[in-house]
Amino acid sequence: DPQDRWTAVDAYLSDLLIVQDAALAAALIDQAAAGLPAQNVSALQGQLLTLLAQMQGARRILEIGTLGGYSTLWLARALPPGGQLVTLELQPQRAALARRSLERAGLSGRVEVRVGQATDSLAQLSADGAAPFDFIFIDADKPSYTEYLTGALRLARPGTVLMVDNVVRGGCVISPESDDANVQGVRRFMAALAAEPRLTATALQTVGSKGYDGFVVARVNMAGDTILE
Ligand code: DHB
Ligand code: MG
């Protein structure tokens, strides 16, 4: 079974490369105990988020879709002193769980968990004149991904990096006839991404303990970027 192999290799790589601290482990235990779905990123993917945010030198990070705050912990630890992360979550129970996990990790001072429809929270942040974010992670309900991209771009600047989870969906993303609303949501998002002249993007297919899926990585173009013709 390929899934068993992917999971075993993820365990091998995690054992070698990841220091799974107590706060991260506790976040997953509490999330499972609260009955939340195990839709968090893997530890290896979490460390990728940390690394990419650090490579970007991100001082302001936006996350759309908090769940239990596991990816939030990985992103928050990438911040330098004085950095800030805003994470958007629809469900108050999940937001409360995330706040507890951040508290336990000593990271709550640099994170704001905003409860509500993320499209509303994004519009509110824009209306409030929020400073642009350097790094944006989209990992929420798939049917709204296109609206989240629109809202995220309003809060971005030239050079902002976007990372988007679950864009392959076990390969179903290539099925235009799919009756899965998540697949259709991702397909609509991918079309919007492809049509977005402000972004340069790629997508990575991934296998591992979370199955077969993938990420989009994109960057808002900057004046002076070299354009290939
Ligand atoms: C689902 C959502 C996720 O964010 C994820 O990483 C995996 C699965 C889902 O809604 O099925
Ligand atoms: Mg996800």
Image (tube, rainbow, N blue to C red):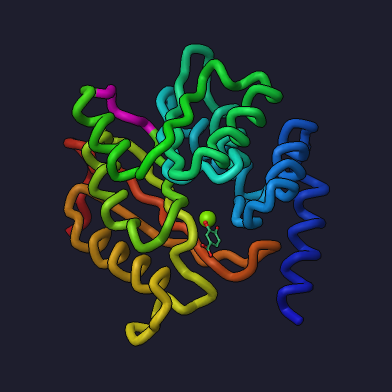
- Which quadrant of the figure has residue 38? bottom right
Q: Nearer the viewer, residue 175 or 135?
A: 175
Q: Quadrant of the C terminus?
A: bottom left
Percent x, y of residue 225: 23, 41
Q: Nearer the viewer, residue 104 or 43?
A: 104
Q: Is residue 40 left or right of residue 152?
A: right
Q: How many marks?
A: 0
Question: Which secondary structure is most common in the magenta stretch?
Answer: loop
- Which quadrant of the figure has residue 202? bottom left
Q: Quadrant of the N terminus?
A: bottom right
Give me the residue at 75% from left, 65% from top.
7
Give me the residue at 33% from left, 57% from top.
144
Q: Nearer the viewer, residue 23 or 226?
A: 23
Q: Nearer the viewer, residue 56 or 39?
A: 39
Percent x, y of residue 175: 39, 83
Percent x, y of residue 170: 54, 75
Residue 132 falls inside the magenta stretch:
yes
Give me the residue at 79% from left, 32% from top.
22
Q: Is residue 102 left or right of residue 157?
A: right
Task: Indicate whether 189 appears above or below 155.
Answer: below
- Which quadrant of the figure has residue 176? bottom left
Residue 31 falls inside the magenta stretch:
no
Instruction: Report the span colored magenta.
Output: 130-134
Quick one: which residue is furthest to the top in this view?
A: 82
Give me the residue at 72% from left, 50% from top.
32
Percent x, y of residue 130: 27, 23
Task: Indicate whether 16 appears above or below 205.
Answer: above
Task: Indicate whether 167 appears above or below 116.
Answer: below
Task: Indicate whether 30 appears above or below 56.
Answer: below
